[in-house]
């Protein structure tokens, strides 16, 4: 696939700096997210953090998207639009999906946060979604394929009784937030596109408690589970190397 780009040394350095800002946002949100705030409050907080660190929100205006970040509560899988009308309640879960543009190089990552005390089932959903990401990067390096990633995510998620969304996928990233190759969260090991050294990719399992079917609201963005059961999302941007991957957006106190 000749359309797939690799990053220059300079672009890799910019991506590291973009990732540092992303990490700062995720750590700050741990304290900021609580019952009583709105998803618009999250958006404003993230936007200000980016501006204060010489970055811009890549999502704002992307294909007409009207906010700085995506905030997806409970049955919303992805692309929830921050709103003054959505007040977080104790027991909710909220995925905050963020794209940070630093001098023209982007990172894209997501965390699903608990609002106060949540149910054991919701906690399991968050944990399985996150762990499926780490299953996918075990042994991942140049020469492995996009199908290796999808197979690892799918088998871990389904073994835990949940389902992976089929209609949305991970992607390459760099000078644009979405580049080739597409990286499905399901599939067959060994299939798909071969990864090469210095490609940057986003792996982003979207996991549903019930069936994998989704629907899009009339706003054209908000993506919900069709059965109304809850969903979680976890994502990091990484550089593919000869010997592994360099995670650009993983908080320093989180382990691989
Ligand atoms: N991280 C989102 C994705 O990969 C991108 C959100 S920007 C938006 O789909 F404009 F599409 F919301
Ligand atoms: Co993404």
Image: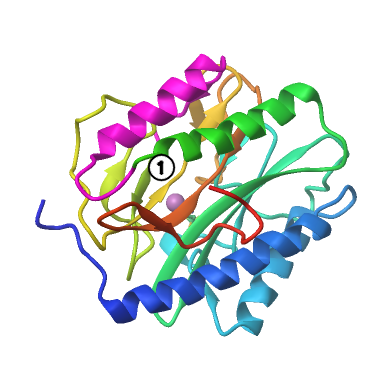
| Element under disc 1 | helix
Q: Is residue 254 magenta?
A: no
Q: Position of residue 79 (x, y in %)?
A: 55, 47
Q: Position of residue 10 (x, y in %)?
A: 32, 81
Rendered residue at 18%/44% (across/down): 194
Can residue 109 be seen here? Answer: yes
Q: Please state which of residues 87 and 127 is positioned toward the viewer in this rendering.
A: 127
Quarter of the image where one finds residue 176 = bottom left
Rendered residue at 23%/39% (across/down): 145
- 177 to 223, vertically: above or below: below
Label 1, on which residue? 137
Can residue 168 be seen here? Answer: no
* 132 displayed left or right of 12: right
* 198 displayed left or right of 118: left
* 184 displayed left or right of 65: left
Rendered residue at 41%/60% (across/down): 63
Rendered residue at 82%/32% (across/down): 118
- 226 to 111, vertically: above or below: above
* 147 displayed left or right of 44: left
- 226 to 28, vertically: above or below: above
**Residue range (magenta):** 140-168
Q: Please state which of residues 170 and 145 is positioned toward the viewer in this rendering.
A: 145
Q: Position of residue 84 (x, y in %)?
A: 78, 56
- The 10 Å Cα crowd at callout 1, few under 14, some 14 to 19, many 20 or more, is some
Q: Is residue 148 magenta?
A: yes
């Amino acid at each position: 696939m000749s359309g797939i780009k690799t990053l220059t040394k300079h672009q890799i350095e910019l991506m590291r700096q973009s990732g540092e800002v992303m990490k700062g946002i995720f750590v700050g949100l741990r304290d900021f997210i609580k019952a009583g705030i709105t998803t618009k409050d999250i958006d404003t907080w993230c936007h200000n953090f980016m501006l204060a660190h010489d970055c811009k929100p890549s999502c704002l205006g992307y294909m007409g998207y009207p906010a700085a970040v995506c905030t997806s509560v409970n049955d919303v899988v992805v692309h929830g639009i921050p709103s003054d009308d959505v007040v977080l309640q104790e027991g909710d879960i909220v995925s905050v999906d963020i794209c940070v543009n630093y001098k023209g190089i982007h990172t894209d990552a997501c965390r699903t946060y608990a609002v106060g005390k949540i149910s054991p089932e919701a906690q399991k959903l968050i944990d399985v979604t996150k762990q499926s990401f780490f299953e996918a990067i075990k042994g991942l390096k140049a020469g492995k394929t996009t199908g290796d990633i999808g197979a690892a995510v799918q088998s871990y998620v389904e073994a835990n009784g949940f389902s992976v969304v089929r209609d949305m996928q991970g992607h390459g990233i760099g000078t644009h937030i979405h580049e080739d190759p597409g990286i499905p969260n399901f599939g067959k090991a060994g299939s798909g596109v071969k990864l090469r050294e210095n490609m940057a990719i986003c792996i982003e399992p979207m996991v549903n408690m019930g069936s994998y079917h989704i629907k899009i609201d009339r706003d054209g963005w908000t993506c919900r589970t069709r059965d109304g059961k809850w969903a979680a999302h976890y994502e990091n941007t990484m550089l593919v190397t000869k010997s592994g991957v360099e995670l650009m957006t993983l908080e320093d106190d989180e382990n691989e």
